[in-house]
Amino acid sequence: MPPIKETAHMLNDIPPETSGALMAMFIAAIRVIYDREETKPIRVILESLICGALSLTASAGITAMGFDMSWSVFAGGTIGYFGSATVRALAVKIIRRKVG
């Protein structure tokens, strides 16, 4: 087993996009289980994957807007916490405002 300092260094080597996606997946899984509304394993897995994919998409947007990539972890945590349905509803609301 590697020493603690070496392990901490390895965690810093993970790209921010990956860290953000993993954060989104972890928080989404915990949130779905904690809500106890629908805790089927397939629901937990699918919600986690969707939130991870949304986080990767947000990371691309963060890069395109010129922000620091450390915002990817924040975006991933936020997406995981609010969930895919809330993110979708917010996106639809913003798009309707811009188009309409």
Image: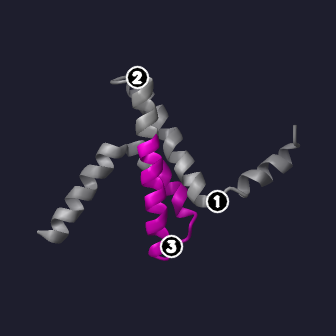
Which tag is nearer the camera, tag 1 or tag 3?
1
Of residue 41 and residue 77, the one placed in the foreground of this image is 41
87 shown above or below 62: above
Q: Give the total number of marks visible in the rendering.
A: 3
The residue at 30%/44% (across/down) is 85
Amino acid type, residue under disc 1 in the picture: Pro
Question: Which element type, helix, strand or loop, lies under badge 3?
Answer: loop
Give percent across and percent down for residue 83. 37, 43
Question: How far is disc 2 from disc 3 in space, using C-alphas?
Answer: 37 Å
50 shown above or below 13: above
Q: Which of the two discs, 1 and 3, labels the residue nearer the N terminus?
A: 1
Q: Which residue is mark 1?
A: 15
84 shown above or below 29: below
Question: How far is disc 1 from disc 2 in space, using C-alphas?
Answer: 31 Å
55 shown above or below 25: below
Which tag is nearer the camera, tag 2 or tag 3?
2
Q: Which of the two discs, 2 and 3, labels the residue nearer the N terminus?
A: 2
Within 10 angstroms of label 3, few (less than 14), some, or many (20 or more) residues?
few
Give percent across and percent down for residue 67. 50, 73
Say if the magenta span includes residue 73. yes
Within 10 angstroms of label 2, few (less than 14), some, or many (20 or more) residues?
few
Does 52 sit left or right of 10 as displayed? left
Residue 15 picture quarter: bottom right
Q: Which residue is mark 2?
A: 40
Question: Which element type, helix, strand or loop, lies under badge 1?
Answer: loop
From which residue to which does the magenta span run? 49-77
Amino acid type, residue under disc 3 in the picture: Phe
Residue 67 disc label? 3
Give percent across and percent down for residue 79. 42, 49
